[in-house]
Amino acid sequence: MNYSVISIMDLPDEMIIKIWNNLNNIDVLYSFVGVNKRFDTLVRDQLYTRSIQLAEKTSKTNKYYPLSDSIIDRYCLYILPQIHHCIECLILEPFSMERILLSCHFSRLRKLIFIKINGDFIFRHFNSKIDALFFE
């Protein structure tokens, strides 16, 4: 039998996007930003950059966990500075929230969702701002 080898680079854009649509945005951005000019163009589509969840949800327990430090480092140092102007929604967990929010200016950010937070977190990070909003 004669087998031919096909690389992902041989696939048309539409097929690559169909494959990527079966992955979560975190994996698509992490894996394909900076690979080459073609993938950079494809991965910067609003489908992948408008809303970004930077926490991992397990399918077994349905719970959220922080991403590893190496993944957060790549996002904060390389990926977010390139796409920050496209992001409208960030979904974050408390462990890496500060690093992510300080990594760049999110000029189009309209929605910020915190998952897995407790009362201490809210009190520590938002108490003075909440007081200013409701008690002036």
Image (cartoon, rainbow, N blue to C red):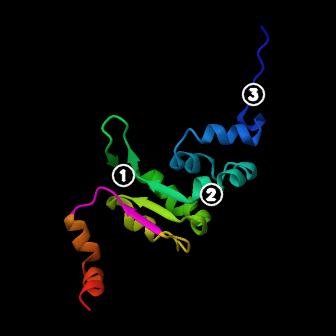
Q: Which amino acid does label 1 sit on?
A: Pro
Q: Residue 121: which disc?
A: none
Q: In this view, does 136 lie above or below 77?
A: below
Q: How far apart are marks 1 and 3 (CA)?
A: 35 Å
Q: Which amino acid does label 2 sit on?
A: Gln
Q: Which amino acid does label 3 sit on?
A: Ile
The residue located at (56%, 38%) in the rendering is: 22
Instruction: Answer few, some or many: residues within 10 Å of disc 3's Cα (few below 14, many 20 plus, some between 14 and 19).
Output: few
Q: Is residue 16 magenta-colored?
A: no
Instruction: Answer few, some or many: residues within 10 Å of disc 1's Cα (few below 14, many 20 plus, some between 14 and 19).
Output: some
**Image coordinates for residue 38, horizontal then vertical, percent:** 75, 49
The residue located at (46%, 62%) in the rendering is: 90
Which quarter of the figure has residue 45? bottom right
Q: Can you identify the residue that label 2 sits on?
A: 46
Q: Are marks 1 and 3 in contact (CB under 8 Å)?
A: no
Q: Can you identify the residue that label 1 sits on?
A: 66
The residue located at (38%, 60%) in the rendering is: 96
Farthest residue to the top: give it. 1
Mark 3 or mark 2: name the one nearer the start of the chain.
3
Which quarter of the figure has residue 126? bottom left
Q: Can you identify the residue that label 3 sits on?
A: 6
What secondary structure is marked by label 2? helix
Mark 2 or mark 1: name the one nearer the start of the chain.
2
Q: What stretch is highlighted in magenta?
A: 111-118
